Amino acid sequence: MLPTRRSLLTAFLAIPALPIVSLRQAAAQRRPLPPTPACGNDRDLTLARTAGPFYKPDAPMRHELFADSPDGERITLAGYVLDANCRPLANSLVEIWHADETGAYDTSGFRLRAHQFTDANGRWWFGTIVPARYTGRTRHYHLRVQRRGGGLLTTQLFFPNEPANASDGLYSDALLLDIRNTADGKFGRFDFVV
């Protein structure tokens, strides 16, 4: 029997702050996918990508975006914001925006747009939907991440095994979500290194 998104998120949020060595070991063991940038080396910070034409400032602060698109396939996204030495960064800004289940962005309001700040252990999460592909682009999320007092990272996260990944000029294996199927949708994990 598959776990639920809620059970995976609850387990993720129940983990106390991990020592640096445990974070590195967890990152090395959790994914058979090509590795996302690993902390421990300044050259391995999370890759930047364009914000695209649909970014809007002042998105609301919230975790749950499901109600914005109730017909979409549910997914919970979660991870850490870490520094180059694998230390979790509390109070880091994480902002998300993405297309809906038809491939459209809301350009007049804040549907499927939100921001939050990482908790004391550097963790972030959003409950949202799987975005559709649209002309010229594979499935992706746009995110902005900023550690307290640090520079702003604008990037995109992608889904593994998408046919359109190979033809999307912004796609990178280093920006793949680690996706798990659950009994009630998907659970995606990504740790930002800033």
Image: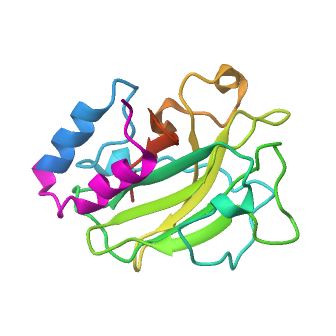
Q: In the rendered view, tell whether residue 38 sits above or below residue 63.
A: above
Q: In the rendered view, tell whether residue 28 sits above or below residue 105.
A: above
- Front residue of 91/155: it is 91
Colouring style = rainbow
Q: Quadrant of residue 67?
A: bottom right
Residue 160 % position (x, y): 53, 28
Q: Quadrant of residue 58?
A: bottom right
Q: In the rendered view, tell whether residue 158 sits above or below residue 60.
A: above
- Residue at image position (51%, 40%) is 186
- Front residue of 109/52: it is 109
Q: Quadrant of residue 114?
A: bottom right
Residue 168 % position (x, y): 71, 30
Residue 143 % position (x, y): 58, 58
Q: Is residue 103 left or right of residue 28?
A: right
Residue 136 % position (x, y): 82, 32
Q: In the rendered view, tell whether residue 65 sits above or below residue 78.
A: below
Q: Is residue 157 left or right of residue 179?
A: right
Whether residue 57 appears in magenta in the rendering, the answer is: no
- Residue at image position (36%, 32%) is 35
Q: Residue furthest front?
A: 1
- Count of labels shown? 0
Magenta stretch?
1-21
Q: Is residue 82 left or right of residue 36?
A: left
- In the rendered image, the quadrant that contains the N terminus is top left
Whether residue 7 appears in magenta in the rendering, the answer is: yes
- In the rendered image, the quadrant that contains the C terminus is bottom left
- Residue at image position (35%, 50%) is 7
